[in-house]
Structure formats: C-alpha cells, structure tokens
Amino acid sequence: MPFTLATWNINSVRLREDLVLRFLREEGPDVLCLQECKSPVDKIPREQFAALGYGHMVARGQKGYNGVAILSKLPIEEVGAADHAGLGHARHIAGRLGNGVTIHNFYVPAGGDVPDRAVNDKFGQKLDYLRDMRDAFHADRPAKSILVGDLNIAPREDDVWDHKKLLKVVSHTPVEVAALAETQDAGAWVDVTRQDIPDGNLYSWWSYRAADWDAADKGRRLDHVWATPDISGAGHSSRVARHVRGWDKPSDHAPVLATFDL
C-alpha cells in the first residue's frame, strides 16, 4: 500500500503549530518527520495533530533546542533513539510501521560558523556525530529502512546556489561532504530525492537573512530522504514543497516529500 512521507525542520513545533496543521491539511502525508521541534515531548501539541488523523507519534524532545518527532496516520512503534557523539541531544528517533519499514528521523548538528574543529567545538561535534552514524550503520546494516531529516549538509554542487563560493562555508565543505558520503555508504543508503530528480539545482533551505529569499534563491539542499536498496526502487514522486517557505512566519526550511509503494 503506498504511503507518502514528508520531512521538515520546523524550527519550533509549538511556535509554528498552525503551519504544521496547515501542511497536514493541505498536503496530507501519511507520515511527517519533524526536526528542531524545540519542545519537551509532553508539550508537543499532539491532540491537535491527532484531530487531523495523525493519532500516532514517536518523539524525543528537550526544552528550547533540538528535538525530533514522527507524526503518523499509520500505527508506528518506537524502535530506537541514538545519542551519537554522546551529546545528550534529542537528535534521533526511529519508528517501525506495521509493514515492517523502519523510519529514522535525524537532526544532524549544524556545526557552527567556522569549518575547523580546532577552533570550533560545534564543527567537531558535527563530524563526530556523522562518524557515529557511519559506525552504527556498519555495525548493524539497515534493511527495509528510510532515513530522513535535516542532515545539515548539501552534498552536490547543484545542491547549493554557488558551489565555489560555498566550499569554505559550513554545510558544503569537502570534509563534511566526505563524512556524509561515508555515512551514506555505510548503510548503502540511496538518495531517493536525487534518484527521482537527478539533474538541476534543488534546495530545501533559504536563509532568513535574505530580504527576498525567493527572488535571491540562494538556497541549499540540507533536508534528505534516503532508503535502503531493498526498498529504494519503490520510492517515487519526490518533491520539495518550496511554497511552504513563503508562508507567514515560516521555518527557513521547506518540507521534502516522497511516496513509497510498499
């Protein structure tokens, strides 16, 4: 039975509750994975989501920072929450649907402003987090799984508005791109978005600093949908809901969607 999945860094689920509700009403994905919820789990407005048919949720939260949640129309069972790099942050939750598909929802550290771990601890934490993700997938090879989230890295040249200008900017540096590639390879993950949209510039994040983000279009593809090879061929209809970035008081990320015939 086909199901549609969306991933969205919401940048505060309580502040942008109305936007989440609007997205659920208008787009109606079967599963919505949120990052940067910035809320304890018991403060997430789950009753309002349930009223729209999203009666199932697995989540990890903390006050004011990080936080990940999976809202689902379909029954989902929590099956893990890793603390990679030992940061004590709510950055991962995994749930399993009734069809046996495991969904991993990640919020990888942003990494600060300086791409040098010697002077920027946050950049070191980001690299350590990716290392631990890689090692976890090596140790326990995933199967029948989907990985989504704000991975905070735009890996391809056409995932950023200007490859050369961003080579020394955190999120597109060669060391980050290499670390993400190692993580992807460790689980043999297939980039479903680029499987469906192989060519051309594609972004999911635009800075708040741009006076007119849409016209400037200085974006990056930081939000990803991956799948293991045993089910990646079932993925299709990938898209970025770019228009959502233009809603009132939006997140700086737009949702990314894909449908799986499983």
Image (cartoon, rainbow, N blue to C red):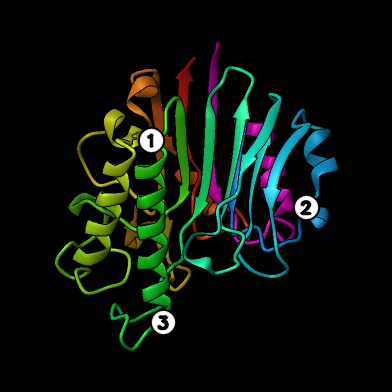
In primary-sequence order, the first of circles 3 and 1 is 3
- Mark identifier at residue 44: 2
- Identify which residue, 92 or 171, lies in the foreground: 92
Task: Write down the region rendered in magenta.
Answer: 1-30
Give the CA separation, mark 3 to mark 1: 30 Å
- Mark identifier at residue 162: none
Q: Residue at x 26, y 53 (%)?
A: 155
Q: Position of residue 222 (x, y in %)?
A: 38, 54
Q: Position of residue 237 (x, y in %)?
A: 40, 24
Asked which secondary structure carries label 3, the reply is: helix
Amino acid type indicated by mark 3: Asp
Asked which secondary structure carries label 1, the reply is: loop
Q: Residue at x 35, y 66 (%)?
A: 127
Above or below — where is 16 with respect to 119? Answer: above
The residue labelled by disc 1 is: 141
Residue 30 visible in image: no
**Counting other residues with Cα less than 10 Å from the Cα at mark 3, is it few (<14), some (14-19), or many (20 or more)?**
some
Above or below — where is 178 with respect to 34? Answer: below
Apparent side of residue 6 relative to residue 40 in the rendered image (left or right): left
- Identify which residue, 51 or 70, lies in the foreground: 70
- Mark identifier at residue 121: 3
Amino acid type indicated by mark 1: Arg
**Counting other residues with Cα less than 10 Å from the Cα at mark 2, is it few (<14), some (14-19), or many (20 or more)?**
some
Give the CA separation, mark 2 to mark 3: 30 Å
- Identify which residue, 212 or 104, lies in the foreground: 104
Asked which secondary structure carries label 2, the reply is: loop
Q: Is residue 34 magenta?
A: no
Instruction: Say whether marks 3 and 1 touch (CB < 8 Å).
Output: no
Which of discs 1 and 2 lies nearer the camera? The answer is: 1
Instruction: Say whether marks 1 and 2 touch (CB < 8 Å).
Output: no
